[in-house]
Image (spheres, rainbow, N blue to C red):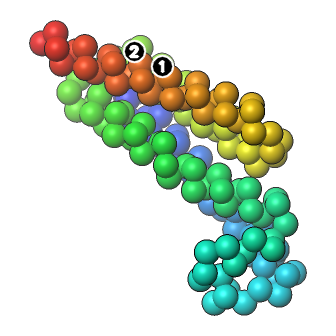
Amino acid sequence: MTMLTPVLALIVWTLIVWCWMYALRIPAMQKAKINPDDAIHPGSLNSLPIEARVIADNYNHLHEQPTIFYALATYSFLVGVGDGLNIMLAWIYVALRIVHSLIQIVLRKVMPRFMVFAAGSVVLMIIAARNVLALLLT
């Protein structure tokens, strides 16, 4: 297992959320009689039920902060700082993102979601700091 294996896991999770999103969104649009061409304008899907909106929000979130994770994991792998600790931290980050998704989609509670987001941010900071230290010490 390398530093890139957790990257693959988060990509797979993102694709699962994508499938989940459309499994909810398409029927919701059909029920609301929304023409797909009308969905071109931002906010045009605000009339959909919250179940269909929160999952779309989460799918978008999986393309925001995780981009830092993808870059850090790739950098760590390429420069040889994909050691056991960074691999463990990467898996922790992936687990936190999955928990973040489930809180946002299923529980719909902001404070627990924020706490998980903040914990993931700290994990990214630790991985980044370990990479900076490795760079400075070489």
Q: Residue at 65% across / 82% down in the picture?
A: 39
**In what element is the residue under mark 1?**
helix
- Could you tell me if residue 73 is visible in this image? yes
Q: Quadrant of residue 95?
A: top right
Front residue of 23/25: it is 25
Q: Residue at 67% across / 34% down in the picture?
A: 114
Query: Dot 1, how many residues are within 10 Å of its Cα: few (below 14), some (14-19), or many (20+)?
Result: some
Q: Position of residue 104 (x, y in %)?
A: 73, 45
Q: Residue at 48% across / 19% down in the picture?
A: 88
Question: Is 52 situated above or below 2?
Answer: below
Q: Which mark is residue 88?
A: 1
Question: Is 87 situated above or below 39?
Answer: above
Q: Quadrant of the N terminus?
A: top left
Q: Is residue 111 left or right of residue 70?
A: right
Front residue of 102/16: it is 102
Q: Residue at 44% across / 27% down in the picture?
A: 124
Total residue callouts: 2
Q: Is residue 64 left or right of residue 111?
A: left
* Residue farthest left in this picture: 138
Q: Report the amino acid beneath label 1.
A: Met
Q: Position of residue 96 (x, y in %)?
A: 61, 31
Q: Which residue is mark 2?
A: 84
Q: Quadrant of the C terminus?
A: top left
Q: Report the amino acid beneath label 2.
A: Gly
Residues at marks 1 and 2 touching, judged by CB atoms closer than 8 Å: yes
Front residue of 69/15: it is 69
Q: Position of residue 117 (x, y in %)?
A: 60, 33
**In what element is the residue under mark 2?**
helix
Question: Is 71 situated above or below 51?
Answer: above
Q: Quadrant of residue 22?
A: bottom right
Q: Is residue 137 left or right of residue 88?
A: left
Q: What is the CA distance from the residue labelled 1 to the residue labelled 2?
A: 6 Å
